[in-house]
Amino acid sequence: MLDHIILGCRNLEEGVSFVEKQTGVRAAFGGRHIGRGTHNALLSLGDCRYLEILAPDPMQESLSWFGELTRISKPEIVTWAASVRDLPAFVTRLRSAGIFCTDPAAGSRTRPDGRILRWNTVDLEDDWAGRLPFFIDWSADSIHPSLDSPSGCSLKHFLLAGPDPGNLTQTFATLELDTPIEFGPILHLRAEIAGPRGVLTITS
């Protein structure tokens, strides 16, 4: 199940303004990923889903996560996350199916109010340049960002398009993903986010 979409941009304020101009809702600052060189702003999409706007953090010396953020000419989807409840069991199933992935790794972020969010993630060895998701399991003591991020937007569509939908469907079934797939000349993600001002379409 989709957990969140990451919209990458070179500058966080520019990314927030880009989304606000189209939807009419302004994302709120989420916090910094210390050691990774990024910071974010968040916007709830309802139903335990949210949009994460991600950019290099000028307060950190180096960018070790999503290095392409410095080269993006306009905001675009850089990856997405799918929710999984039992990551160790999920990893076992993937490896049994011949899919290489990392062991679960802990992550955290301090919110502006000082509260720490914690999670565990699993990455695929080959995520098709972010077209396939990473997998996340939020700690029980962490508030899911969709619950207290600015509301007013909803996710109308989120899908993966590519020239071989049959193969994509098989891959998604193995990964236990329910995201729609359609034909397209190139492999790409597309999301349509509806807000009080209009609909924002973003792609990878």
Image: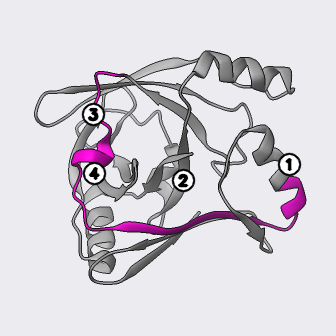
Residue type (three-letter) at the residue carrying disc 4: Ala
Q: Is residue 91 left or right of residue 99?
A: left
- Image quadrant holding the N terminus, namely top right
Mark 4 or mark 2, earlier in chain: 4
Q: Which residue is mark 3?
A: 143
Of 7 and 144, nearer the camera is 144
Q: Which mark is residue 170?
A: 1
Q: CA distance from mark 1 to mark 3?
A: 33 Å
- Residue 118 percent across, percent down from the top left: 34, 23
Residue type (three-letter) at the residue carrying disc 2: Val
Residue type (three-letter) at the residue carrying disc 3: Ile
Q: Is residue 8 left or right of residue 93?
A: left
Mark 3: few/some/many CA within 10 Å (<14, 14-19, 20+): some
Q: CA distance from mark 2 to mark 1?
A: 23 Å
Q: Which residue is mark 4?
A: 41
Residue reaching furthest to the bottom: 198
The label nearer to you, 4 versus 1, is 1
Q: Which residue is mark 2?
A: 78
Secondary structure of the residue carrying tag 3 is loop
Read off the magenta span.
140-168
The label nearer to you, 2 versus 3, is 3
Mark 1 or mark 3, earlier in chain: 3
Q: CA distance from mark 4 to mark 1?
A: 34 Å
